[in-house]
Image (cartoon, grey):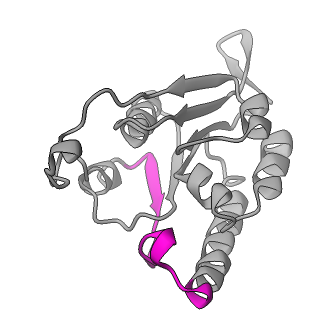
Amino acid sequence: MSVYEGEKLMKSCVHIYCGDGKGKTTAAIGLAVRAAGGGKRVLITRFLKTDHSGEVKAIKALPEIEVTPCERSFGFFSNMTKEQKKEAKAYYSQLLESTLMRSKEGFDLLVLDEIMAVCNYGLVEESRVLDFLKNCSEGLEVILTGRNPSERLMEEADYISEIKKIKHPYDKGIKARKGIEY
């Protein structure tokens, strides 16, 4: 993968934001905003998250950024029934496929938010993500977020940033706050 940046040929890269700390999605959204500010087209697909987070409203206001709606929520994976897991797998696999097809429509940056979780839970086939990363369009920068990326995904990455939790209000029983955690 490569893009022209002025006269210099630059490689498109795969970024991973992972770890147990708060800020993986925030980092991805920050880079998406930076790319949009640089005139680049951005496609963001969120897995396991609906559009009820504060950042979605803000980034939808930017004409360079498109957010693929995640219209279904299945709750926590550990609480899903076998049937719900089957439904979730069908839904998220289709969401991934439609996103990968759309990524060919002249986008410069693709964010797959919480892709590691859906891979780790078997709700999408990691091999499909790996195949896409190896064969995606020239000029497409890709961001993957979530906990516990596999060795195979890390091998495909050019950047890996681990966000480590040292302290979090949740540990004291403080629930997620609108505009801060979501």
Position of residue 114 relative to residue 41, above or below, is below
Tell me what residue is drawn at x 63 percent, y 63 percent. 121
- Count of numbered tags: 0
* Left or right: 87 as drawn, with respect to 170: right
Bounds of the magenta segment: 63-84
User: As drawn, which residue projects farthest toward the front?
Assistant: 172
Instruction: Give the x, y percent position of residue 68.
Output: 49, 64
Tell whether 21 sits left or right of 159: left
Q: Considering the image in quadrants, where does the N terminus appear? A: top right
Instruction: Inspect the magenta stretch and tell me whether residue 70 lies in it.
Output: yes
Vertical position of residue 179 compared to residue 89: above or below: above
Q: Quadrant of residue 92?
A: bottom right
**Residue 138 appears in the rendering:** no
Q: Is residue 9 visible?
A: yes
Tell me: 110 left or right of 70: right
Q: Is residue 80 magenta?
A: yes
Name of the residue lying farthest toward the top? 8
- Determine the residue positioned at 45% across, 31% down: 31
The reply, left or right, for residue 75 in relation to residue 85 is left
Question: Viewer-proximal residue, 8 or 20?
Answer: 20
User: What residue is at 51 percent from the left and 26 percent from the top?
Assistant: 162
Q: Position of residue 113 (x, y in %)?
A: 51, 50
Q: Quadrant of residue 8?
A: top right
Identify which residue, 25 or 135, lies in the foreground: 25
Q: Position of residue 108 (x, y in %)?
A: 61, 39
| Picture residue at 57% right of the left edge, 55% below the top | 117
